Image (cartoon, rainbow, N blue to C red):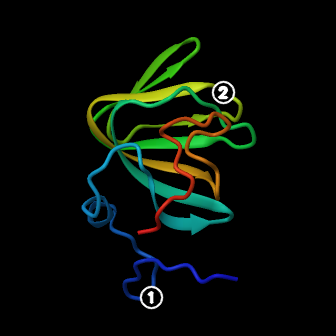
Amino acid sequence: MAMRLCVVADGWGIISLADKLAQFQDHWNPRIVAHYNGNEVRLAKVQGDFTWHAHAETDELFLVLSGELGIEFRDGVRRLKPGELVVVPKGTEHRPFAEGECHILIMDREGEPNTGVNPSALTRESLETI
């Protein structure tokens, strides 16, 4: 079994999201910052439109850290501000977007493609762990 590395302070797995976000600048390319119970905690900087997609076998959680995130669903748009989160149920088509730069935390099943079952130019075959 591969050992997973995380930032540790005083024996606890404490991770600075600000420090992790400072390590990259690109948009729509999530980084893994932690693993738990078969899930990944991912950070991303987003701006502009993502692709329509769905995750067939898993829910997806979005937590806005800064900026404003919109998520378009087939029945309308939800807008999230810093400190707000939404859980998108498995199988639900959605398209995230951000008019300005937005920083988000995403929780997804380990190994789940960022575009779910809908490959596109924005699909990341593997995600970097930082």
Question: Which residue corresponds to mark 2?
Answer: 92
Determine the secondary structure under disc 1.
loop
Q: Quadrant of the C terminus?
A: bottom left
Q: Quadrant of residue 3?
A: bottom right
Tell me the residue at 58%/14% (across/down).
74
The residue lying toward the viewer, choosing from 25 and 75, is 25
Question: Which residue corresponds to mark 1?
Answer: 11
Tell me the residue at 26%/53% (across/down).
25
Relative image position of residue 52 (x, y in whole percent):
55, 26
Kind of residue at badge 1? Gly
Q: Earlier in the sequence, mark 2 or mark 1?
A: 1
Relative image position of residue 14 (x, y in whole percent):
40, 74
Determine the secondary structure under disc 2.
loop
Q: Residue furthest top?
A: 75
State left or right for residue 74 relative to residue 102: right
Q: Quadrant of residue 39?
A: bottom right
